[in-house]
Amino acid sequence: MAIRVLFPSSQPQPQPHLQPSRSSTTTRRSSRQRRGFCCFCSSTSSGGGDEVSSSSSMMTVSITGATGFIGRRLVDKLLSAEDHKVCVLTRSTSKNKASSVFPASRYPGVTIADKEGDWERCIRDSTGVVNLAGMPISTRWSPEVKSEILQSRVNVTSKVVDHINTSSNGNGPSVFVSATAVGYYGTSETDSFDESSPSGNDYLAHVCREWEGRARQVKQEHVRLVLIRIGVVLGKDGGALAKMIPLFMMFAGGPLGTGTQWFSWIHLDDLVDLIYESLRNPAYTGIINGTAPNPVRLSELCDRLGQVVGRPSWLPVPGLAIKALLGEGATVVLDGQKVLPAKATQLGFSYRYPYVRDALKAIAKQL
């Protein structure tokens, strides 16, 4: 679950890729070209457990949560890189939104699937599947909301896994990339966490365990599973900064609570690159923390943001006010954890923005 923080307000170089040998790539490409397909509308596909690891291999990717903050950027990345194809998996009640976000005139490489049979067909004929669906968590947590936060993740993940497993006996997608969140680790002001760290004991940790447990039910003898535990995603059009920037521009910005809580962040472009590489590269498997290598305290983030937008970071919001607004959901804002991307570092993933000051400068240029 990508943690999108709700802040009190009256308003919301190409990566180096690990590639197989030329002979291995040629064999896989030939196998794919003999099969022929793309989610309703293309003539090339991958199936039968093939890994897509050549930079010139076209992919067809089915995505849940494609209309969200992360999903939209991932779709753009796939369509601009190697002319890949995308199938947007959505509910029938959300089809109009998906059609408005991805109009056919501008997105000819996108198919929108809103019926059960369409989901099944898309997933069966895809190279890979990316699961980003889930209700936002930065709100007041009533018992009903907590149930929906959990079920919105578990139910969609179960549905996707069932379709993958039905089609995975030699003809379905070869890779399943499923989002989860750094909430898995619980919170701490003193401890550091990496992919080997145990789960926490709070509500968000429980949600992540259930979420990941459903994803792990995919037939991993046929499908490579990647679980990306996502931190706070920084970008201009969504997530935490979409709430923070207007406050700073009105000279009302500052840290929330004590400001000493750890803020494990990642720039949107780096997260999308990490998902893209996970689809393409067979070395990417298992748990991978979707965070930048240099987490910061929230007070430092606010100071840096004030500097890049030319505004002071002088108006802290007391923790009691946040608790009054969000109740138990205030834990998303007031508690933090220092999460390190040990696996991505080991794999040689190259971050465009390893430091928060550079990430914020890049975002500020887009304002």
Image (cartoon, grey):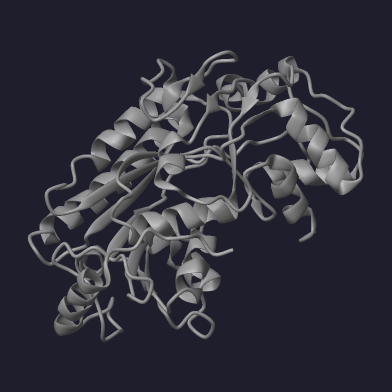
Q: Dividing the picture into quarters, in which one does residue 100 lie?
A: bottom right
Q: Dividing the picture into quarters, in which one does residue 338 lie?
A: top right
- Find residue 98 and report its horizontal and vertical position in percent: 48, 67
**Where, quadrant-wise, is the N terminus in this rendering?**
top left
Residue shown at 34% from the left, 76% from the top: 58
Instruction: Indicate left or right for 97 with 90 as reference.
Output: right
- Say if 214 sits above or below 12 in the image: above
Instruction: Indicate left or right for 265 with 167 as reference.
Output: right
Front residue of 68 and 49? 49
Front residue of 18 and 309? 18
Q: Can see residue 91? A: no
Front residue of 185 and 341? 341
Q: How many marks?
A: 0
**Where, quadrant-wise, is the C terminus in this rendering?**
bottom right
- Say if 203 sits above or below 239 in the image: above
Instruction: Indicate left or right for 19 with 255 as reference.
Output: left
Residue shown at 44% from the left, 61% from the top: 94
- Say if 357 sits above or below 258 in the image: below
Seen as rendered, the residue at the extreme left is: 169
- Find residue 223 and report its horizontal and vertical position in percent: 19, 53
Residue shown at 72% from the left, 48% from the top: 358
Residue shown at 33% from the left, 49% from the top: 284
